[in-house]
DNA sequence: CTTTGTTAGTGCTATAATTAACATATAATT
DNA sequence: AATTATATGTTAATTATAGCACTAACAAAG
């Protein structure tokens, strides 16, 4: 129960390890090692062991790790032992893409409500979820116990949506709008900026200049 | 021309700074400071100056930075002084979302060709680009001088697409498939895993356990 | 012309993260 | 039962990154 600091890079890698272990498990493999995992995801074996060491001892020396066990442990660490209710704001192309993304449901993320400000979208069905007007965000998100909000609206409206989500009681926000959001410190916030990702690539492609 | 190592975190921040400066410039503001930028994007002023210092001196002491100038400098650093041709593979919901994403074109990323393996999608128009069959990827990407490939196909097919893109001569790949891709070291690769992003959030929400 | 306020640039320090090395534990084999 | 091979868990070292504090430069005011 002590509060030691864990690098975010470690969390990201754990997530990748667990995905890898899911694949390995599907192949019927029972036991694996830090070296196998390292090869599978492209990091060093020491890194794998170090990452796991933050949370306990999951393997047996001289032997390795039980695939199913380790996978379950990591999922529990990541907080994925139970489902999470997710509210999506923005039913544009990106919103649609997120809804149809299989990976979310597989990992226990259930999109329970969808909101949009465009009257022509309100009322339409995406999967089995009906698109509701923004005005109902607070009320519905509150009563549906939503813990996570996804912002998939244009930059101009994103801060307003973030404020509404927080008022509705979400604890975490995944923001796709290319804008810096202001949220209180207890709210977990992550930004996915598609252009930024491309720009890191273009910098690196031309990096011989430096 | 010396090859000193620049942290990736710096590049990501530079990208955010430039976006912020675009906004500031639109407001008609002429001069800004490391403190202003820091406030605007949520980092420390020292960090801003440190990041810029990797690449030269762009401000005047006691005064600050000229907004337009600094913006231009950063864009040039990021390799955005000219447009980039981008090939998109996968015309599903995510592919559609990426095509309609304004941020790409604004920053000089032009999606010049789109490919999909689904015959029902081949031939359809997305914006003013026609969806072509995967079989033509190599040929078309080569002659259209594509430098960047975006993979927006399911995990199972992603490695194959990556191989084809590399054969076609792309230098950088942005991968949305939840799988670890194997590419030669000279190819720049970035992964955007939507589930991983959510999992970092859920870990942090429950992080009081550690 | 001098003084004061301001802000960029930079070297140093502290912190964080990765890599490497080592000691410990397990299983299999002779 | 002892020995060997293997792979973990952990400590130490190295490297990378961020933060702080100081210096240098400039502008405006008096």
Image (cartoon, coloured by chain):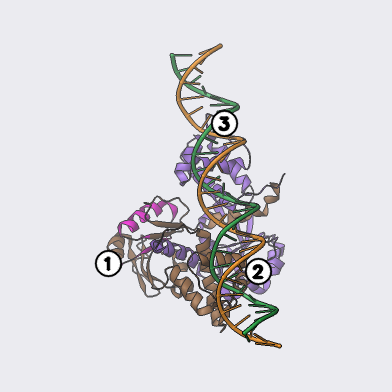
Chain colours: A purple, B brown, C green, D orange
Secondary structure of residue under mark 3: loop
Towards the viewer: A117 or A177: A177
- Magenta residues, start to end: B143-171
Q: Residue at x 40, y 74 (%)?
A: B127
Q: In this figure, which residue is indicated by the disc labeled 2?
A: A182
Residue A60 - label: 3
Residue A4 on the magenta segment: no
Q: Residue at x 53, y 38 (%)?
A: A67
Report x, y in % for residue B84.
38, 69
Residue B150 on the magenta segment: yes
Q: Residue at x 31, y 64 (%)?
A: B141
Mark 3 in CB contact with mark 1 (< 8 angstroms):
no
* Mark 2 → mark 1, Cα distance in angstroms: 45 Å
Residue A89 picture quarter: bottom right
Residue B143 - label: 1
**Above or below, A55 relative to A202:** above
Please report, as a chain letter, where disc 1 is located: B
């Amino acid at each position: 129960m002590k509060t030691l600091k864990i690098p975010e890079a470690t969390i990201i890698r754990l997530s990748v390890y667990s995905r890898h272990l899911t694949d390995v498990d599907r192949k019927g493999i029972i036991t694996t090692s830090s070296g196998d995992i390292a090869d599978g995801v492209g990091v060093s074996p020491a890194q794998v062991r170090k990452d796991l060491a933050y949370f306990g001892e999951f393997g047996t020396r001289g032997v390795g790790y039980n695939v199913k066990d380790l996978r379950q442990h990591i999922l529990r660490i990541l907080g994925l032992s139970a489902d999470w209710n997710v509210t999506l704001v923005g039913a544009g192309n990106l919103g649609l893409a997120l809804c149809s993304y299989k990976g979310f449901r597989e990992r226990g993320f259930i999109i329970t409500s969808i909101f949009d400000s465009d009257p022509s979208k309100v009322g339409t069905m995406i999967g089995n979820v009906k698109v509701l007007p923004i005005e109902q965000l607070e009320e519905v998100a509150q009563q549906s116990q939503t813990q996570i909000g996804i912002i998939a609206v244009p930059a101009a409206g994103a801060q307003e949506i973030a404020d509404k989500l927080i008022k509705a009681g979400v604890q975490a926000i995944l923001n796709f709008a290319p804008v810096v959001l202001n949220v209180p410190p207890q709210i977990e916030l992550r930004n996915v900026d598609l252009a930024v990702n491309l720009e890191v690539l273009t910098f690196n492609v031309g990096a011989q200049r430096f």
